Image (spheres, grey):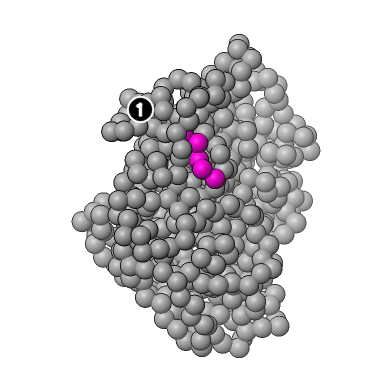
């Protein structure tokens, strides 16, 4: 994903460009833009209508808190703004977007821009990705480009924003100043972003050294070309953007409506890594695999509550995926309701009925019933948990919206296919002391099943077979064993919408990133990358694939 990324540059923008000196606008009319950070560290703005909803809820919460002195709203469900964003919730205190059906967490931010800027006019600048789709620049880059375009500049240097690119307005191309690689750019007019009060200084599109820009913009000098570690977790302090090309991943800018899927029960086996081995994905309902792994991995300690597999549990697998049975299995009903505690799903008091009582009904769960998760002890309306589970994958597992603890075994909707593993002696850059593990994924086009977005419709499988690489050392072999478990649980791919091409009903990566190149990391998908193994271990942990579950 290359466009707004690359090595840093100290080159300034064109002389005479409005706002090219560091600073802020004092204009009191402002628009609010909410953005989320993708897997390469780039900030991507939500669409205008989604931003309007987020800002409305955010401002109402602020006003309610000032009037009553009570706590502010802590979460914003994006499905109320756009049905295709149903899996996503923004957690305001941690400034994190949480995807309920996969557990993926991404940073979010809120920035204010002048009302007469690109954001206020609904103007978005976009670059063409490798697959022919259009990806938006982050909003402060859009504002900077629009300022240059409005003042009839023929060319602008993005070095002042931390990007190693030049944009030629006449030719409508972006050029990498190091490699001279060119991409098309375009200017698109959409819905304006929401007007809001401006108690803070406004961004004018140019990076500066004030605390607000330094902490929140992510456009400071780039000191590394590698994707930073732990970018899917809210405690990451890294903000550097990195070089990369496009990848087909599911993101909140497009998303897809959650859907049902079958349960894969747990059966254990411990195959060894041979020079050549093939793992075929069973049909839905087949066994999943748990594999042992060694110690010494640096990854977030994401709690997972896994029941040991048993014949009884496997026999009950079908009934336990019934929504109310799942909720009752993992939550215990509370007799006394906390008076001042909020349900972070519906944002209502726990002492009041569930905010989802008008859209979700339970045969044995009442709107006022409050339950507490048995392991982490967080409390919610049980009807809210039922609504959350019903809008997700319905695989018999739950994930706490507060602390992300996983209950049960999370499975996915990956189409059937084949995973091949082999080794060869050639080393990867950055891992000269060992050989290489090659993984080849084979998935063919087919017809969507009942667990997919559009049952009965065809799905495409672009770019298969896909070749991926790991270092053949202790940690690399550990990642391989975890990837095998993820493959068996159908978590590596899914059927959805490509965020790069916009194509729907196609096989896309499912938030577990792979290295698809060996000899260069100019695209962000190769080596060397000293953080990659820790990154992918963190992403696997977010899917519930950890050493703890491997020991079952």
Against 45, residue 297 (above or below) is below
Q: Main secondary structure of the magenta part?
A: strand
Q: Position of residue 492 (x, y in %)?
A: 45, 63
Q: Quadrant of the N terminus?
A: bottom right
- Regarding residue 322, the answer to whether it shows in the image is yes
Against 247, residue 85 (above or below) is above
Along the horizontal axis of the image, is 548 left or right of 354?
Answer: right
Q: Position of residue 408 (x, y in %)?
A: 45, 53
The residue under label 1 is: 366
Is 243 covered by the magenta stretch?
A: no
Which region is colored magenta? 371-375
Along the horizontal axis of the image, is 260 left or right of 274?
Answer: left
Q: Position of residue 315 (x, y in %)?
A: 31, 60
Residue at the spot x=62%, y=25% of the render?
A: 114
Residue at the spot x=43%, y=42% of the render?
A: 87
Q: Tag 1's secondary structure?
A: loop
Outermost residue on the left side: it is: 456
Residue at the spot x=78%, y=34% of the render?
A: 210
| Closer-to-camera residue (353/142) | 353
| Closer-to-camera residue (105/138) | 105
């Amino acid at each position: 994903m290359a466009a707004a990324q690359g090595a840093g540059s100290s080159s300034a923008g064109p002389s005479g460009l409005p706002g090219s000196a560091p600073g802020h606008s004092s204009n009191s009319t402002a628009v609010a833009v909410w953005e989320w950070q993708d897997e390469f560290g780039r900030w991507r703005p939500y669409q205008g209508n989604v931003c309007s909803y987020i800002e409305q809820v955010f401002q109402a919460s602020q006003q309610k808190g000032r009037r009553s002195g009570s706590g502010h709203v802590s979460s914003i469900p994006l499905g109320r703004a756009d049905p295709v964003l149903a899996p996503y919730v923004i957690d305001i205190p941690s400034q994190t977007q949480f995807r309920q059906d996969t557990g993926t967490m991404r940073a979010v931010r809120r920035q204010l821009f002048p009302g007469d800027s690109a954001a206020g006019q609904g103007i978005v600048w976009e670059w063409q990705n490798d697959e022919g789709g259009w990806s938006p620049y982050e909003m402060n880059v859009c504002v900077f480009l629009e300022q240059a375009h409005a003042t009839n500049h023929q060319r602008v240097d993005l070095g002042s924003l931390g990007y190693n690119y030049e944009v030629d307005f006449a030719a409508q191309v972006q050029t990498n100043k190091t490699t001279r690689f060119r991409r098309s750019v375009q200017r698109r007019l959409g819905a304006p972003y929401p007007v809001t009060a401006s108690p803070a200084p406004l961004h004018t599109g140019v990076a500066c050294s004030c605390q607000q820009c330094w902490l929140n913009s992510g456009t400071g000098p780039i000191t590394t070309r590698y994707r930073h570690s732990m970018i899917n977790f809210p405690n990451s302090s890294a903000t550097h953007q990195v070089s990369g090309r496009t990848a087909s991943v599911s993101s909140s800018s497009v998303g897809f409506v959650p859907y049902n899927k079958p349960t894969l029960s747990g059966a254990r086996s411990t195959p060894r890594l041979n020079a050549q081995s093939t793992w075929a994905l069973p049909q839905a309902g087949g066994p999943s695999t748990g594999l042992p792994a060694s110690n010494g991995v640096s990854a977030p300690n994401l709690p997972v509550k896994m029941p040991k597999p048993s014949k009884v549990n496997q026999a009950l697998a079908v009934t336990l995926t019934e929504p109310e049975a799942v909720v009752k299995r993992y939550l215990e009903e509370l007799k006394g309701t906390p008076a001042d505690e909020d349900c972070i799903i519906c944002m209502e008091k726990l002492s009041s009925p569930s905010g989802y009582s008008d859209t979700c009904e339970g045969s044995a769960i009442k709107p006022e019933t409050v339950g507490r998760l048995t392991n982490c002890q967080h409390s919610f309306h049980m009807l809210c948990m039922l609504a959350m589970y019903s809008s997700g994958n319905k695989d018999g597992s739950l994930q706490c919206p507060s602390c992300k603890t996983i209950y049960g075994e999370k499975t996915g909707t990956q189409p059937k296919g084949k995973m091949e593993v082999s080794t060869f002696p050639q080393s990867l850059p950055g891992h000269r002391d060992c050989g290489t593990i090659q993984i080849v994924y084979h998935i063919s086009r087919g017809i969507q099943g009942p667990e997919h977005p559009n049952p009965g419709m065809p799905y495409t499988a672009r770019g298969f077979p896909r070749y991926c690489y790991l270092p053949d050392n202790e940690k690399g072999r550990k990642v391989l064993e975890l990837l095998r478990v993820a493959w068996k649980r159908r978590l590596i791919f899914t059927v959805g919408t490509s965020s790069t091409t916009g194509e729907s009903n196609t096989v896309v990566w499912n938030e577990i990133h792979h290295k698809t190149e060996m000899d260069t990391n100019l695209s962000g998908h190769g080596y060397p990358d000293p953080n990659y193994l820790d990154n992918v271990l963190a992403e696997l942990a977010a899917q519930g694939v950890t050493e703890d579950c491997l020991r079952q």
